[in-house]
Image (cartoon, rainbow, N blue to C red):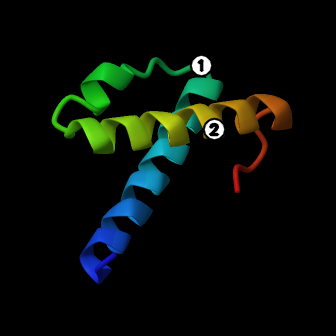
């Protein structure tokens, strides 16, 4: 994986965590709109990370996501 791809993954992971936190705090998140311009591979990866962080937030009671 090249450096640019790694940087993009870190950004996507940050976004997935941020949107999951927003959802857990009761703010509406339209995940279809968020992933609308992503290719199929990016979309699948992003949605998996988003689900992971949502579960984490729900278990933690929305404290700090790590």
Identify the element where label 1 is drawn: loop
Q: Is residue 21 left or right of residue 30?
A: right
| Image spot of residue 52 (x, y percent) | 63, 38
Going from N to C along the chain, the mark reached first, 2 or 1, is 1
Q: Which mark is residue 52?
A: 2
Question: Quadrant location of the C terminus?
Answer: bottom right
Q: Which residue is labeled 1 in the image?
A: 26
Single out the residue that lies furthest toward the left: 37
Taking the image as shown, residue 62 lies to the left or right of residue 30, namely right
Please tell me in which quadrant of the rendered image residue 57 appears. Answer: top right
Residue 64: x and y in percent read 74, 50
Badge 2 marks a residue whose secondary structure is: helix
Crowding around mark 2 (Cα neighbors within 10 Å: few <14, some 14 to 19, many 20+) is some
Q: Residue furthest bottom?
A: 3
Percent from the top left, x then y, of residue 21? 60, 37
Give me the residue at 21% from left, 39% from top: 38
Residue furthest to the right: 60
46 in relation to 4, above or below: above
Quarter holding the N terminus is bottom left
Residue sitting at x 39%, y 53%: 12
Q: Nearer the viewer, mark 2 or mark 1?
A: 2
User: Is 26 displayed left or right of 6 in the figure?
Assistant: right
Q: CA distance from mark 2 to mark 1?
A: 17 Å
Residue 61 relative to residue 25: left or right:
right
Name which residue lies at 74% across and 38% down.
56
| Image disc number at residue 10 | none
Q: Residues within 10 Å of mark 1 (few under 14, many from 20)?
A: few
């Amino acid at each position: 994986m090249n450096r640019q791809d790694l940087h993009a993954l870190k950004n996507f992971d940050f976004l997935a965590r941020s949107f999951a936190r927003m959802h857990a705090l009761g703010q509406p998140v339209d995940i279809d709109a968020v992933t609308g311009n992503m290719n199929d591979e990016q979309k699948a990866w992003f949605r998996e990370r988003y689900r992971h962080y949502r579960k984490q937030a729900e278990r933690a009671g929305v404290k700090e996501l790590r």
